[in-house]
Image (cartoon, helix red, strand yellow):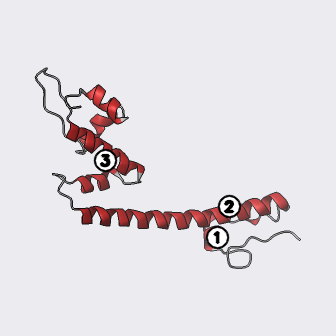
């Protein structure tokens, strides 16, 4: 499917024309050469590269990380890609742990505030830092409940 103009290339890749131009400005996609028609034409290699960028974005890689993965001449080894994916996996795991902590704090807040008096809803009267540090209740981040 070589020889696509920017509009058809963008449509085939599931992105907008401005996204293609943005990726070109960021150096993720090279501006294509002009074909016989005088229009810039995208190749199958360009389609592969755009698909790679989209898959990597869905996996949570930043554009800078994707640029590193693609490299100047796509000269990255499988080992380098594995290491980058492992680093991203570790970062996601850290985010998951933090989100799980936040989820627990919010569940406790909902429980206390929905089943107690406004005096029992201590979290409304303390700062976020105290909530995050567990400086209330039993010292372990547990909100008091009404008797």
Q: How dense is the environment of label 2, judged by Cα within 10 Å: few (below 14), some, or many (20 and up)? A: few
Nearer to us of marks 2 and 1 is 2
Q: Quadrant of residue 143?
A: bottom right
Query: Mark 2 sits on what residue?
Result: 106
Which label's residue is closer to the chain start, 2 or 1? 2
Which quadrant of the figure contains the C terminus?
bottom right
Query: Mark 3 sits on what residue?
Result: 52
Say which of 94 and 129 sits in front. Answer: 94
Q: Position of residue 55 (x, y in %)?
A: 37, 48
Q: Is residue 12 above or below residue 48?
A: above
| Residue lying at 77% horizontally and 62% vertically, measured from the top left | 111
Which quadrant of the figure contains the N terminus?
top left
| Residue lying at 36% horizontally and 31% vertically, measured from the top left | 16
Q: Residue lying at the far right in this picture: please name it.
A: 147
Contact (CB < 8 A) between labels 3 and 2?
A: no
Q: Which mark is residue 119?
A: none
Q: Is residue 37 above or below residue 111?
A: above
Label 3, label 1: how far apart the Cα atoms are: 44 Å
Identify the element where label 1 is drawn: helix
Say which of 86 and 3 sits in front. Answer: 3
Q: How dense is the environment of label 1, judged by Cα within 10 Å: few (below 14), some, or many (20 and up)? A: few
Which label's residue is closer to the chain start, 3 or 2? 3
Nearer to us of marks 3 and 2 is 3
Query: Mark 1 sits on what residue?
Result: 130
Q: How dense is the environment of label 3, judged by Cα within 10 Å: few (below 14), some, or many (20 and up)? A: some
Identify the element where label 2 is drawn: helix
């Amino acid at each position: 499917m070589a020889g696509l103009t920017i509009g058809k290339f963008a449509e085939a890749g599931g992105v907008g024309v401005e996204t293609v131009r943005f990726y070109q400005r960021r150096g993720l996609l090279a501006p294509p050469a002009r074909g016989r028609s005088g229009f810039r034409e995208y190749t199958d290699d360009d389609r592969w590269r755009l698909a790679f960028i989209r898959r990597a974005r869905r996996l949570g890689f930043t554009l800078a990380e994707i640029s590193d993965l693609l490299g100047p001449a796509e000269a990255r080894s499988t080992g380098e890609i594995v290491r980058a994916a492992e680093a991203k996996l570790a970062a996601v795991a850290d985010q998951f742990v933090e989100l799980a902590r936040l989820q627990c704090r919010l569940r406790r807040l909902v429980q206390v505030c929905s089943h107690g008096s406004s005096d029992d809803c201590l979290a409304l009267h303390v700062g976020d830092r105290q909530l995050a540090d567990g400086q209330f209740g039993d010292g372990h981040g547990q909100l008091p409940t009404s008797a």
